[in-house]
Amino acid sequence: MNKFIFVSGGVCSSLGKGVAASSLGALLEGRGLNVRMVKCDPYINVDAGTMSPYQHGEVYVTDDGAETDLDLGNYARFTSGPLSMANSITTGQVYRSVIQKEREGRYLGRCVQVIPHITDEIKSRIKAVAREDGDTDVVIVEIGGTVGDIESIPFLETARQMIREEGRLNAISVHLTLIPEVAGGELKTKPTQHSVKAMQEQGIQPDILICRAPVMLDEATCRKIALFTNMENDSVFTSYDINTTIYEVPLIFFEQKLDQIVLKKLGVESRHANLKPWYTMMDKFAARRGRVRIGIVGKYMDLHDSYKSVYEALFHAGLETGVEVELVKIDSARVEEADDAAGVLGPQGEGVDGVLVPGGFGERGINGMVRAAAWARENGIPYFGICLGMQIMVIEWGRSVLGWEDANSTEFKQDTKHPVISLLEEQVDVKNYGGTMRLGKSETVAEPGSRIMAAYGEKNIFERHRHRYEFSNNYRKEMTDSGLSLTAFTADRSLVECVEWPGHPWGLGVQFHPEFKSKPTAASPLFRDFIAAVRDRRA
């Protein structure tokens, strides 16, 4: 069977539509259904690859190298269905495809219009995800933006058409709205009423209403909302503020019987729910003892979503190791401008127990990251470098240990005498920076006896990449002769994938992005071991 659930949002953005859609997916998987997630993004960019992290948050990378919206990261953390380029649909992709077909004459001279040509293209992409795996039961389609946005209209129109064409037992609408609280603690339902009215003007009567509210809505309020929005009384649910973790949301929805009502509306026989992994995860959350402070020394610290997967992976590692992980966000420019790194990172500053340098692009703040790495190495502070963070380890080693004061990456200084990090040879002449990087899943082979092999428990590792620059092979001998451990390579050993500090409590950097595969029910091995090392050192 192919069932479709369209998840939309109203009143305002950032209500947690992605978390709600992912939580519903987790519940349906708990009922034994095979679920696939799709994100429809109204922006005209072809993908998120060239967007600023300050504007759009992190870029989430799939196995096949698609650069997607961060909501796909939520899907990956909450559900187990495969994610690929097909699971991310943007206005840019749709229009590019339609225009290309028009140029090729495939519309036989017809006037190309939003309806039916654009909506048909969107429909074909959604249905392709449903057909990709013959075992797919339900496709959950999250429509980005807010009802009323001009950019979202083609996607909402597509949802309207599919609900009509597939039938009410095969396609339903789930709408997320806001219930604000005004002075005196009164909850106001009028914005939700207007949001549903806007959906009805688009030709869609929501089947399920999820109300984002500060507290659980009482029965009387739910009945009032149902009455004024043409909903059934049992179809109004609450996504209320919690002080635990977003990973409790599936359990909150389960207690309200959201999954049961969804299955009923889709005509699917209710099945036994197995949510043991989620309850076990919450038990681990409650059992945490002690706290570790991790300094994230990066470039895009003003927006939390810029390093969303990194922060989530640290949280997952805390669950696995039994400690609370406190995130200390440090703009690398602060470290660069300080008299010394200890003034920012040490006891007289932030007093961090571990340092993590994540990925990034551009020269700003790089010297601050190098100083942070040197401070961690010299003081035996656990350090974890991801992508750029690994390259920083190499640059710092070249400067501090080998005495090459100008050791650098050609990304930051083209004419450096010691380019210990350099551009991939095949991309030297690339001018179009969209989709030109080393992207997606590839194999890494770990060296016996290394920390990376101990973490994964095997030598063949498959993780995802997103970068252009690499450890320069011209410096392998000098780096290893001076003591730096190169502990993982590509399968053909042509590229360095991991470096480790010898004789250090835990100093490790990888060229790939392990955060993308971390889940609350299965922490990334490297993040887990990093936090364990921080915990043990603090103890």
Image (tube, helix red, strand yellow):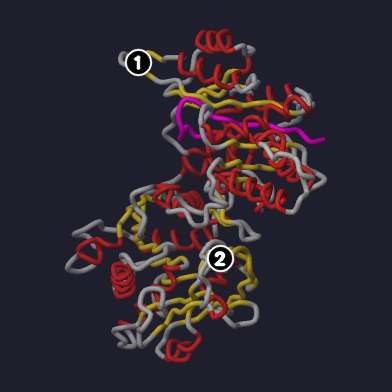
How many numbered marks are there?
Answer: 2
Residue 89, by quadrant, is top right
| Residue 341, placed above or below residue 20 | below
Residue in front for this viewpoint, 328 or 317: 328
Distance from the alpha carbon under mark 2 to that under mark 1: 48 Å
Q: Position of residue 87 (x, y in %)?
A: 65, 47
In which image quadrant can residue 78 be found? top right
| Amino acid type, label 1 | Gly
Question: Tag 2, which secondary structure?
Answer: strand
Q: Is residue 511 above or below residue 320?
A: below
525 to the left or right of 539: right
x, y percent for residue 141 = 65, 37
Residue positioned 54% across, 36% down in the render:
151
What are the residue bounds of the magenta stretch? 1-17
Q: Is residue 176 left or right of residue 118?
A: left
Residue 8 pos. (x, y %): 58, 30
How crowded pointer 1 is (Cα within 10 Å; few <14, some 14-19, many 20+) is rated as few
| 63 left or right, relative to 330 | right
Q: Quadrant of residue 344?
A: bottom left
Instruction: Please tell me the numbered disc located at residue 465.
Output: 2
Residue 200, labelled with which disc?
none
Q: Is residue 430 left or right of residue 419?
A: right
> Which numbered dot is residue 185?
1
Residue 435 vertical placement versus 265 (above, below): below
Magenta segment includes 160: no
